[in-house]
Amino acid sequence: MITQDSLRNCHFCSLISQTNGEDPIGSAATCEHFFAMEMGLPWSEKRFLENSTIQSAIALIDQLMLEYGVNIQAQLIVPDKEYSHPGYTRILYYRRPAKLFAEFEKQEFIIPAHLVGSFVIALLNTLFPSSEQLSNWQQYRQESNHIRELMICTDGNVDVACGRFGYPIYQQLRSEFAPASGGKLRVWRCSHFGGHQFAPTLIDLPTGHYWGHLQPEILAPLIQRHGSVSELYQYYRGWAGLSKFEQIAEREIWTQEGWDWLNYHKAGQVLAMDEVNQEWADIRIDYSTIDGSINSAYKARVDVSGCVMTSRNSGDNQLLEAVKQYRVSRLSKVV
């Protein structure tokens, strides 16, 4: 059990990470599919083991990832008294639409509680080759493509840093920014999605951008996408449409192109890399502008710039480890 004394005495992994200057870039999960389902707290291991829907979903996700190489990010979200409906469960599903893209395609369903298990299985089965679509479930589909969803990890069961630092950021976003959006922004507490040393951390959907080490003063530019891009440089974990070294290169391009870059259709490619020691990589990022008038690319060299000590988990008996830090040493636009 987490007590106030244990929190006071705890060595938080995210504070060690920030103090030692660990760069969060390149830590976003590379995904083709996002899946989020409402489920009330508590999220205990015992409850998960006894929940047949979750166990069936985990089995299918494991099969998709291991046998077919499908990258899936699966989340639980806490029902909200304003957004949610008693007796029903909201399920959000996002899929990568094409090789070059800017946003994941969204589908939202609100399913009667007694049908949730059947729907989850049906949805995940659509990801297998030669699968059927969800034609029998369209009556439960919601028109919400105009709504941006922010998912903030507050899952203290995985690491206390997420609960300690994630919840205040969630509260600020939920109480200040969501009401001011005119129904175009929803803010959710969600389960762990990796990188708790970067708490507080969030996923921004449908774009699929990951952020970490969040501070209250940078929430406005992050949500409203205004001001200098450089303000957010050190908080950017990366874009889910790219792999690790591609994410590192993409951040540098973003600082050059500005906010419009987030709306450009993009795809990454690792041209060459140090497979053994992960010391360097040559990257190409292809892109097209919103109106399609420009189709071009950047090439970048990513190199190791040093290392810092960090901790993967919070606790009194932490094991610190050295993690490599990277920089973009060369960046050029392909003519």
Image (spheres, grey):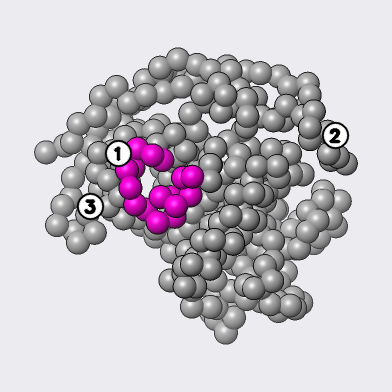
Q: Which residues are magenta?
A: 217-232
Q: Secondary structure at mark 3?
A: strand
Q: Amino acid at mark 2?
A: Asp
The image quadrant of residue 329 is top left
Q: Quadrant of the C terminus?
A: top left
Main secondary structure along the magenta-highlighted residues: helix
Left or right of 237? Residue 299 is left
Left or right of 98? Residue 116 is right
Label 2 or label 1, whichever comes before in sequence order = 2
Say if 214 sits above or below 132 in the image: above
Q: Secondary structure at mark 2?
A: helix
Q: Work out how far the residue at label 2 is from the one at label 1, CA to CA, in angstroms.
A: 43 Å
Mark 2 touches mark 1? (CB < 8 Å)? no
Residue at coordinates 59% horizontally, 81% vertically from top-left? 140
Q: Position of residue 214 (x, y in %)?
A: 53, 42
Is residue 138 visible in the rendered image? The answer is yes
Residue underneath mark 3:
288
Q: Nearer the viewer, residue 205 or 13?
A: 13
Left or right of 233? Residue 139 is right
Q: Amino acid at mark 1?
A: Thr
Q: Which mark is residue 5?
A: 2
Q: Nearer the viewer, residue 17 or 304?
A: 17
Residue underneath mark 1:
255
Residue at coordinates 83% horizontally, 39% vertically from top-left? 4
Q: Amino acid at mark 3?
A: Ser
Discs 3/1, front: 1
Q: Position of residue 233 (x, y in %)?
A: 40, 36
Residue at coordinates 49% horizontally, 45% vertically from top-left? 217
